[in-house]
Amino acid sequence: MSIMEYNGGSVIAMVGKDCVAIASDLRLGNQALSISSNFQKVFPVTDRIYVGLPGLGTDVTTLRERFRYRINMYTIKEEREIEPETFAHLVSSTLYEHRFGPYFIEPVIAGLSKTPSGGVKPLIAAADLIGCLNFAKDFVVAGTASTKLLGVAEGLWEPDLEPEDLFETISQTLLNSVDRDAFSGWGAVVHVITKDSIISRTLKGRMD
């Protein structure tokens, strides 16, 4: 078994019309043994950026604190809030620094960047464990159920979804995918980021 699959877990991010959504399951396992059904993998970075960290459970905690430190240092130095694209490259460089003994995490980033006209532009990205970035216009996936997530998302996602439709789409994609993966599941959490608000909902999943 790969070390990436040891604790299980999956994350997906999707783009909508002036909004983005990011969701993850809540399982923490020791291979096939389930340990917790409330293990958070998605964390707020700013009011407009969230990051999902599927992979080895210990590295989830380590990287979360490392990113928090780097974001605080950036905010103090630059005297402004970090933009999603800048944060994506910060994630990439943090992972690449440790390429010879990497963190076993494949981050997923979702956020809204400000445009000069005063509007917002959705941005999602995913990285591998040494920080190779993949920016997408539709959806990105990571974790043990990533192949299932890709298949279901291809069938359900449509361009320019409104926030409520995006929530429904990402929820159905995640719940149906983790049901087909032994190392993911046990409920889910979904965050929909819009220009004015962040909507967070916890979903019940199969517990068997």
Image (cartoon, rainbow, N blue to C red):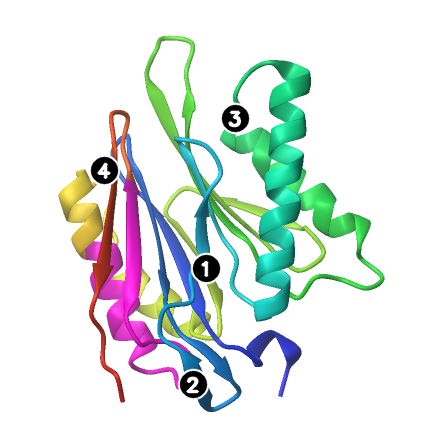
Three-letter amino acid code of the residue under disc 3:
Glu
Between discs 1 and 2, the one toward the N terminus:
2
User: Which residue is found at the position 49% from the left and 76% from the top?
Assistant: 8
Q: Is residue 57 left or right of residue 191?
A: right
Q: Which residue is labeled 4 in the image?
A: 160
User: Is disc 4 placed on a helix, strand or loop?
Assistant: loop
Q: Residue furthest top?
A: 117
Q: Is residue 21 left or right of residue 162?
A: right
Q: Is residue 180 left or right of residue 54?
A: left
- Name the quadrant containing residue 90: top right
Q: Residues within 10 Å of mark 3 (few under 14, many from 20)?
A: some
Q: Is residue 105 visible?
A: no
Camera-nearest label, 4 or 1: 1
Camera-nearest label, 2 or 4: 2
User: Which residue is found at the position 15% from the left and 47% from the top?
Assistant: 165
Q: Which residue is labeled 2 in the image?
A: 34
Q: Which residue is labeled 3 in the image?
A: 83
Cα distance in 3D space between marks 4 and 3: 22 Å
Cα distance in 3D space between marks 4 and 1: 26 Å
Q: Which residue is labeled 1 in the image?
A: 41
Camera-nearest label, 3 or 1: 1
Q: Position of residue 14 (x, y in %)?
A: 34, 48
Query: Magenta residues?
Result: 169-192
Cα distance in 3D space between marks 3 and 2: 36 Å
Three-letter amino acid code of the residue under disc 2:
Ser
Between discs 3 and 2, the one toward the N terminus:
2
User: Which residue is found at the position 68% from the left and 18% from the top?
Assistant: 77
Between discs 2 and 4, the one toward the N terminus:
2
Q: In this view of the protein, which residue sits in the foreground, 109 or 150? A: 109
Three-letter amino acid code of the residue under disc 4:
Asp
